[in-house]
Amino acid sequence: MELGSDHPGFADADYRRRRAEIAALAQHYRPGDRIPDVRYTPDEDALWALLSGTLADLHRAFACAEVVRAGHDLALPDGRVPQLREVTDRLGELTGFRMGPVPGLVPTRTFYAALAERRFLSTQYLRHASVPLYTPEPDLAHELIGHATMLASPSLAQLYQEAGRASLRAETEPALEFFSRVFWYTIEFGVVYERNQVRAWGAGLLSSFGEIQAFRNAQIRPMDLLAMGTTDYDITHYQPVLFAGASLERQVDELGAFFASYDDDTYARLVANHRSDERQGVPHG
C-alpha cells in the first residue's frame, strides 16, 4: 500500500518494509483459512501497551457503559499486540463475529459486504511509533480497540451485520454514499446521552486519543438520519458536528430499523423529502 507524503512513516524505509512484511501475510488469506500470526517485535508490543493502556483509561472516562462492558468482555491483552486469530476466537464466543486479515484498505463495498457475513476486515500493522497516539488511516489499534470492542457487544454486533446487509441493497453509488455517511456518523463517530452527559460509542472516537477527549466540543445535534446522510465530513480533522441519540438502546433500535429497510427506493424517498424541505426552508438536526 502506498503511503501519502504526509504519513508519519512516509520517509521511514524500515517502517515501510515492516508494513510490507505484515501485509504479505494477509495477501493470500481466504475466509475459512487459519488467520496467519504476526511475530510482533518488542517495540511493537511496547507501542500497543501504550495505546491500549491510554485508551482503556479514556474509555472509562468518556465512553458509554455498553462499550466499557464490551471491552471488559473482549479482554484484549494490554502488554503485547493481540493476534487477530485470538481476537476472532473470542468474538466468536461472544457474538459470532470473525476478523479477516487484509493487507491494507479494501474497496468500500468489499468492506461493508463482509459485515453482512459477520466478518470484519482488518489490517494487522500498527501506526508509526513517532506519533503513537495518532494515525491518518485505520491500523490494528483502530480495528481492535475501536471496532472489535464494539463487536464484542451483541446489540452492536447485530447493528454491524444489519449495516452490511443494507449496503448490499444500496445498488447505486448515491444510495451507498448516503448509507456511508450514516455509518460514519454512527458506527464510526456515534455519541449518545447517558447520565446527562454525552458519551462516545463510535469506533473512530474509541480509538482516537485526542478526539475522544475533545468530541464534546463539537456541535452536538439530535440524531437525524436524513441530516446524517446528507452532511459532509472531513476525515483529516476532528469532527465539528456529531449526532447524539437520547440513549444507546434507542439509537441502536432506530439505526437497526433504518438499516433493515434501507435500499435504493428508501434513498430516493429520503432525498426527495430532503429537497422538498430545502425548498420550504425546513431545518434538520
Image: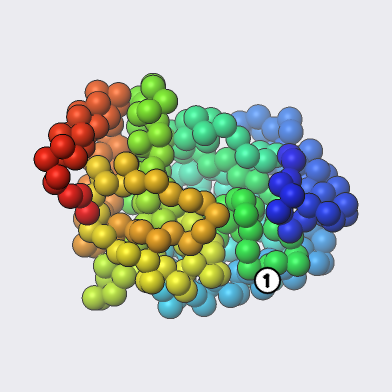
Between 72 and 174, the one nearer to me in the picture: 174
Compared across the picture, whether 121 is left or right of 278 comes to right
Which residue has dot 1 on it?
49
Picture residue at 32% right of the left edge, 64% below the top: 219
Residue 173 lies in quadrant: top left
Q: Is residue 54 above or below residue 185?
A: below
Between 212 and 145, the one nearer to me in the picture: 212
Picture residue at 74% right of the left edge, 40% below the top: 2
Residue 244 lies in quadrant: bottom left
Secondary structure, mark 1, is helix
Residue 225 position, x and y percent, is 26, 45
Picture residue at 30% right of the left edge, 37% below the top: 259
Residue 126 lies in quadrant: bottom right
Q: Is residue 157 visible?
A: no
Q: Is residue 123 visible?
A: yes
Q: Within 10 Å of the Cα at label 1, are there few (<14), some (14-19), or many (20+) other Cα atoms?
A: some
Residue 155 position, x and y percent, is 33, 51
Q: Is residue 45 above or below residue 28?
A: below
Picture residue at 35% right of the left edge, 29% below the top: 175
Q: Quadrant of the N terminus?
A: top right
Residue 210 position, x and y percent, is 53, 70
Looking at the picture, which amino acid does disc 1 mark? Answer: Ala
